[in-house]
Image (cartoon, helix red, strand yellow):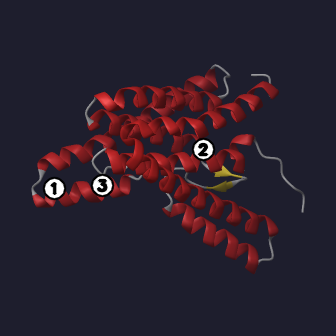
Amino acid sequence: MTRKNYRIFEGLRIAVPLTFISGFLNAFTFVTQGRRFAGVQSGNVISWAYYLAMGNYVQVVQFTVPIVFFALGQVFTYLAKRWFDETHHFWHFGSSLILTIITIFTATITPFVSEYYTNALVAFVASIQVETFQKIHGAPYASVMMTGNVKNAARLYFKGVYEHNKEFREQGRHIFVIIASFATGVYVSTRLSYHFGEFTLWFALIPLLLVNYLLWVEKRSLGY
């Protein structure tokens, strides 16, 4: 079987820190920002409908914020990607840089503002991330939500075993690795959040800067 060459943004080196960041951000907002999720909008929608049924409209509004800003992130990503493509700039590096700038801004203001602002900005970040990075070595994955990853990891690995296809087995293993990376991000963020509180968000910049560096190296190698 011929081994395919993939762009770095489809590699495990990018997927692992990205899913770590996702788990980190979701745990951070859950622990420090009123038990809202940054990227897992299924949990927010369930909570939104639950509080609506209970008549707790204050909570309904609070859960509406990350849902709306996640949706707005999709609009922004579509328009930004069109601009990057039309001007022949490297979108994945540009997106990573945008994520970094917003995260730095959010980490700076979080200790001083209402949780509404933090949840809105972090949900916006998660939305950009999930739309930008969608494949790992050709296999679909989500860097923010894990439901599809669990499904794809099991399906691809079993398909590879059943069909004696090494590529499918490898893709399945890769997705299992990023599921573990997401869980690790949740664990680390939870421990840090109970110790550093809202200042914990600064730690998310460590893996994010790694992603920036790796994408910048590819950008330079491609002559952008």
Which is nearer the N-term, disc 1 or disc 3? 3
- Badge 3 crowding class, 10 Å Cα cut-off, few under 14, some 14 to 19, many 20 or more, is some
Pointer 1 residue:
52
Marks 3 and 2, how far apart in space? 23 Å
What residue sits 62% from the left and 46% below the top? Answer: 17
- Mark 3 and 2 residues: CB-CB less than 8 Å, in contact? no
Q: Is residue 218 visible?
A: yes
Pick the quarter of the image with the N terminus.
bottom right
Pointer 3 residue:
45
Give the camera-side residue of 217 and 30. Answer: 30
Say which amino acid is labelled 2. Phe
- Badge 2 crowding class, 10 Å Cα cut-off, few under 14, some 14 to 19, many 20 or more, is many
In the rendered image, the residue lying farthest to the bottom is 162
What residue sits 58% from the left and 27% below the top? Answer: 97
Which is nearer the N-term, disc 3 or disc 2? 3
Q: Secondary structure at mark 3?
A: helix
In the rendered image, the residue lying farthest to the top is 87
**Position of residue 35 in the picture relative to residue 98 (left or right):** left
What residue sits 45% from the left and 47% below the top? Answer: 192
Q: Quadrant of residue 223?
A: top right
- Mark 1 and 3 residues: CB-CB less than 8 Å, in contact? no
Say which amino acid is labelled 3. Val
Q: Which circle marks residue 128 in the picture?
A: none
Q: Is residue 141 above or below residue 28?
A: below
Pinpoint residue 63: horizontal percent, then vertical percent: 26, 47
Pointer 2 residue:
133
Marks 1 and 3, how far apart in space? 10 Å
**Position of residue 39 in the picture relative to residue 6 (left or right):** left
